[in-house]
Image (cartoon, coloured by chain):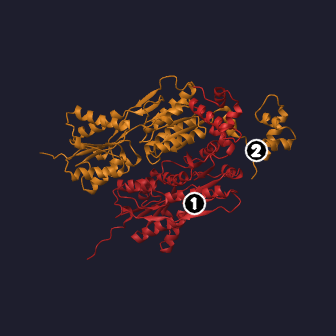
Chain colours: A orange, B red
Amino acid sequence: MKKITILDIAKELNITFSTVARALNDHPAISKSTKEAVKQTAEKLGYRKNKIASSLRSGKSNIIGVLIPSLDVSFFSSVVHGIESVMNQNGYSILLYQSQESYKKEDKGIETLLNSRVDGIIASTAINRVNKETFQDIVTRNIPLAFFDRVLEGIPAPAVTIDDYKGGYMATEHLIKAGYKKIVHITETRNLSIFKERLRGYLDALKAYHIPIDEQLILKGNLSLDFGKACVKELTQRNIPFDALFTLEDFTAMGVIQQLKEQQLKIPEEIGVIGFANEAFGSLVTPTLSTIDQQTNRMGEEVAQLFLRMLKEGNFYQHAPKQIKLEPLLIVRESSKGPYIPNIV
Amino acid sequence: MKKITILDIAKELNITFSTVARALNDHPAISKSTKEAVKQTAEKLGYRKNKIASSLRSGKSNIIGVLIPSLDVSFFSSVVHGIESVMNQNGYSILLYQSQESYKKEDKGIETLLNSRVDGIIASTAINRVNKETFQDIVTRNIPLAFFDRVLEGIPAPAVTIDDYKGGYMATEHLIKAGYKKIVHITETRNLSIFKERLRGYLDALKAYHIPIDEQLILKGNLSLDFGKACVKELTQRNIPFDALFTLEDFTAMGVIQQLKEQQLKIPEEIGVIGFANEAFGSLVTPTLSTIDQQTNRMGEEVAQLFLRMLKEGNFYQHAPKQIKLEPLLIVRESSKGPYIPNIV
């Protein structure tokens, strides 16, 4: 199938290439009747303006790239909903790229998005991200960038996060108030500030309630459903007493629940469980999973607003970047309703 | 921040613009030493080749657009994994656009992807898609297109689907063999062939086992967890006897399970349930949900392979499009283990 070009229109009308080109671009030197003839012929032949070339000239595509670690985590797809609703209202489309938690794939994603002429990038970084070059490069090239949830320290881009420290504190405090005393925390070995902050919240809550910190109850690994299972097995095999677990995120908590059920331990009567992130499955499982909600939709809306303000103001990296920290919300469901307390009459 | 151009390199080296341009493009007329000097100066100044302009010349971006209805459905994200793994191995990146089940948004997505210079599009259509213009247009413009799962009839693009008729038959046959007799089917009012095929499989399985078809047991609506709940409520309120439900997909099945539990009906002893699609949550809920697996990862790999073959062969729409139909797999879990049968001694 032959592609119709400006030349075909010129031939058809027996006028010059440049007259057609100027007519299509609504040039004032071209008469109204010629413009009309060009327009009609273009339609008749099925000509399509090369939008790529036009937007190369204007420098605007009205497309925003969104870089996320994974589609399988409802936290991210929910933030994307928030970003998308604000962006669509403002005439922008978004394109998604998933890094699958690999910084190499993330680098490739940045390249892909920039090659696709996005007007800017909104990102949440891969879990194994250490080097900053590709993100620094976005800033150096003066392309708008904003972060949500997972921020790369040292990059002067605006960001929306939640108060992970407070979330960790709230989750732990809730377990203490519900009556649990030996509270395990499952965290990450990899170096991501959100998880370090949740751990810090856990430690400070224990201190505030005068509960001694027991290093045996702090387990480190790579977050996953299987890791949650492995933690419960290990605690049991090593005969370490515990009556509750606060996990860094919900998939790990799900593994914990499955293994506790496997070992016929009653939740919440014998063991309490709370996760983090309010994944969609948490309200569907039995027992339903207590968790910390991160206001995902709002996080998406806020980061989109920050980004649009940045676009409007220009001079993207001349001011100190705006930072918004959202409040976490405690969601109490069945899994942490408190231990069985004998009714002494 | 000023962007470094070829002109800056030319000034720095006191040579002409065209010498620099040709050196950067490895032109044979330019000496090795000049090329080396240009390369070093380009690096020193932080020059980046305008990849957009280069790929406009070559006409290839090595980016494939993938258009899916929703990120919140693990069926789609799982197919995307399959597409991505094959595409990455072959040097392609993918960009995602979600239509959120709106054909209008889908049209916008096609425009966005094409403006982003993708080399082609792999799509699964929105549930309310009726008009074919935008997809017909992709074909007319001779841009490669392939479908998976949800195919637009009349568009001559290759496609990978599963045998939905067989899936519907298998689900129903399984419930019959497990001992259920009054089997409800929940289906869609909207006109999507995959759901019509599942319904046809249900009807034929009943016929094959000489179970009379009862129109009261076929419920139509818009798939959702809430619709699943509403169906169980309606059947109960109208006093229609039933002992099993086969739902068109898993979210509706989840609503069914929640409402049955709410009404203290035992699953699977009193009521059996089977869904369709093998969503991730199905193995996490209680009781675990029986379902039909659609070989999602393989579906993604197959459609990517079809697409790559199409790219290689060229003349995209000159041959009859290739069609691959995958076999559905029955996944039996707790929710359909069969009714309680009294043990008569």
Task: Work out whether disc 1 and disc 2 sit on a shared chain.
Answer: no
Q: CA distance from mark 1 to mark 2?
A: 32 Å
Task: Give residue B282's position: percent from left, percent from top.
Answer: 40, 56
Q: In the visual, does B40 lie left or right of B14? A: left
Which residue is found at the position 54% from the left and 30% from the top? A140
Task: Give the residue type that dot 1 points to.
Answer: Val
Q: Chain of mark 2?
A: A
| Neighbourhood count class around disc 1 (C-alpha, 10 Å): few under 14, some 14–19, many 20 upward | many
**Which of these two is toward me, A294 or B196?**
A294
Location of residue B322 in the rendering, given as x and y in whole percent from the top left corner: 63, 62
Q: Nearer the viewer, residue B161 or A226?
A: A226
Instruction: From the image, tell me which residue sits under label 2.
Output: A47
> As displayed, is residue A310 above or below residue A260?
above
**Quadrant position of the C terminus of chain A in the picture:** top left
Query: In the rendered image, is residue B191 in sight?
Result: no
Q: Kindly identify the amino acid type of the residue bearing the numbered disc 2.
A: Tyr
In the picture, measured across the screen, residue A192 lies left or right of residue A108, that is left
Residue furthest to the right? A14
Q: Secondary structure at mark 2?
A: loop
From where the camera sits, is residue A74 visible? Answer: yes
* Coordinates of residue B271 in the picture (x, y in percent): 38, 63
Residue B218 location (% of width, % of height): 50, 62
Horizontal placement of B60 versus A326: left or right? right
Q: Are marks 1 and 2 in contact (CB under 8 Å)?
A: no
State whether residue B124 is above or below residue B55.
below
- Which residue has dot 1 on it? B160
Residue closest to the far bottom: B345
Q: Chain under label 1?
A: B
